[in-house]
Amino acid sequence: MWRQQKFDIIVVGGGPAGSTAARYASMNGVKVLVLEKDRDIGMPVRCGEAVSEEGLKNFMDPDPRWIKSTISKIRLVSPSDYVVDFDMKARGFILDRRIFDYDLAQMAAMEGATIVTKAYVNGLLFDGDCVAGVKGKYLSEPFELRAKIVIGADGVESRVGRWAGLQTQVKMKDMLSCVQKTVTGIEVDERRFDFYLSKKWAPGGYIWVFPKGKNRANIGLGVSGKYCREKSAYRYLDEFLQHCYPNHSVLTTVAGGVPCDKTLKTIVTNGLILVGDSAHMVNPMTGGGIIPAMKAGLLAGETAAKAIKNKDYGEKYLSRYSREWHKIGGKNHERYYRLKNTITELSDEELDNIAKAVLKIPEDERTITKIFLKAVMKKPKLIYDVTKVFAGI
């Protein structure tokens, strides 16, 4: 029984970040336990389910079972319905997260990790100032488990970091209130991402239409916390659906917060590492979190395993993870954050003018870089950020 076993690492949360951390730590020969509070890995799905093919291939070859749509085009719609179409240089996928997350957990288990669902963690154990395990409930029975390192992968609502004394707060303007409905009975282009940018539909954020096969799509929006007092995200989405897809039928509805913020200044402490949403690693510009979470999970799993072998679980050693994260994604993350702050403050008139300027570019010459350069033309300091983050896209 897992409650009687000894583990080197305990991972709190069985999403992409947690499962990936468990997989790579286990591959390096340490004993890992994953505790997931929900009854099933991969549920509920609170995600647009979009990833880049290139990003996914950093970890494994995509399984056709995971993929609901393969995306090669993007459409941007301005407040006055100016439509900007262009091709993507690299393909994207809309995933079935229930299958995808389940398989990620299975990969971790195949490497030796133990995975337990319905295990609710409600606190940490300490030896002095060092995190030394977790406590919680499993099927209403309390448990306490000690470990040399805890990896917090418990999502945007993460409490693990706060329990350890880390500053995890998000400013209201950087927290998007998000609602998504999977709808059917609509016409969509199965090969295209659609994005609507407008203060009318989604102030401080945007609306996405991500196809999931024929006549079905994830349609959702994020509204900055700065504007949530004016109207709820639910109401914004319902008004958009009624306007653009009046005959839709709703299959599922999910809601939650997305921290479109800089990565936390401190993501490790003695005996603890934070990964994914719990460390605010969501792309601030797009709200995409799957690939950043998996990258962080890989780094965290490998760093934690090395710390175990070196018998050093202190903040100084674990900070190697922080430095590696900054190398592979942290700098671009901050650039995305600066771009987000500029784009979300544009008026609807400015967004329309950008769309009209881009429409003068022949469709086969349009790129995401050229579009963003138009968007920041009055902010010359951001031109360098655009060219760096979108190089090769």
Image: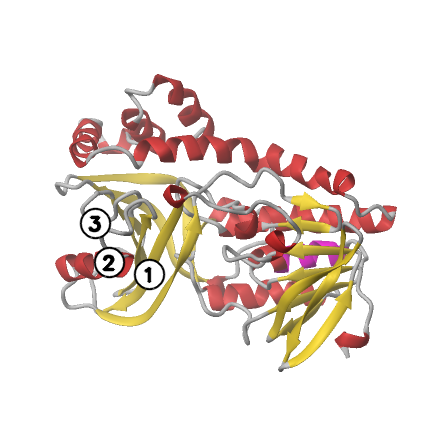
Which residue position holds label 2? 237
Which residue position holds label 1? 180
Q: Is residue 203 above or below residue 141?
A: above
Front residue of 199 and 184: 199
Name the disc covering residue 201, or none: 3
Q: Residue at x 20, y 64 (%)?
A: 186
The type of residue carrying mark 1 is Gln
Q: Residue at x 21, y 43 (%)?
A: 199
Residue 253 relative to residue 97: left or right: left
Q: Residue at x 15, y 57 (%)?
A: 244
Looking at the picture, how far across and down is residue 71, in whole percent? Answer: 36, 50
Q: Are marks 1 and 2 in contact (CB under 8 Å)?
A: yes
Secondary structure under the numbered disc 2 in the rendered image: helix
Front residue of 63 and 4: 4
Mark 1 and mark 3: Cα distance apart in space:
14 Å
- Which stretch did the figure color magenta? 19-27
> Which residue ends up furthest to the top in the rendered image?
380
The first of marks 1 and 2 along the sequence is 1
Would residue 12 be visible to someone looking at this image? yes
Q: Quadrant of residue 239?
A: bottom left
Badge 3: residue crowd in 10 Å (few <14, some 14–19, many ≥20): many
The first of marks 2 and 3 along the sequence is 3
The type of residue carrying mark 2 is Leu
The type of residue carrying mark 3 is Trp
